[in-house]
Image (cartoon, rainbow, N blue to C red):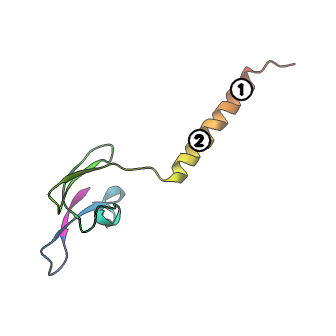
Amino acid sequence: MVGVFYNAGSPVPHSFITGANGVGITDLNALVTLPGGVSLQWVAAINDMGQIVADASNGHSYLLSPVPEPETYALMLAGLGLMRLVARRKLRPIA
């Protein structure tokens, strides 16, 4: 889930995202690096792929796409390598 919140006593909106099942809240500005002084203020939508459209303080809109962490890639590559090894062993003639 995504949305907007205000800090107490501040008129500046902040975009946020929650974790799985709405648990926790993270300011989107903590997850992205934008040019100096620019902050995400209004979040418009999130889709099934986790892409988020947000408006920033500079008047531009940004499309934020999630990037898997390196550990995810490592596990995927290890799994593919293991599958290839198993497939090669099954194709090898028995002597």
Is residue 3 part of the magenta span, yes or no?
A: yes
- 79 or 41: nearer the eye? 41
Q: What residue is rendered at 12% in x and 74% in y?
A: 11
Q: Is residue 11 above or below residue 25?
A: below
- Residue found at x 36% / y 56%: 20
Residue bearing the label numbered 2: 77
- Residue 57: x, y in percent? 17, 63
* Residue 25 within the segment the image draws in magenta: no
In the image, farthest residue toward the front: 36
The residue segment tinted magenta is: 1-5
User: Separation of disc 2 and disc 1 at Cα?
Assistant: 16 Å
Residue at the (30%, 43%) spot, across then down: 48
Q: Quadrant of residue 41?
A: bottom left
Q: Tag 2: residue type? A: Leu
Q: Which mark is residue 11?
A: none
> The C terminus lies in which quarter of the figure?
top right
* Identity of the residue drawn at 21% across and 55% down: 54
The residue identified by callout 1 is: 88
Question: Is residue 26 shown left or right of residue 54?
Answer: right
Vertical order, 15 against 80 (above or below) = below
Task: Tell me which label, 2 or 1, sits earlier in the chain.
Answer: 2
Three-letter amino acid code of the residue under disc 1: Arg
The image quarter in which residue 29 lies: bottom left
Majority SS type along the magenta span? strand
x and y, in percent, of residue 27 in the image: 29, 66
Q: Secondary structure at mark 2?
A: helix
> How dense is the environment of label 2, judged by Cα within 10 Å: few (below 14), some, or many (20 and up)?
few
Vertical arrangement, residue 43 with respect to residue 49, above or below: below
Direction from residue 63 to residue 73 in the image, left or right: right
Q: Which image quarter is the N terminus in? A: bottom left
* SS under mark 1: helix
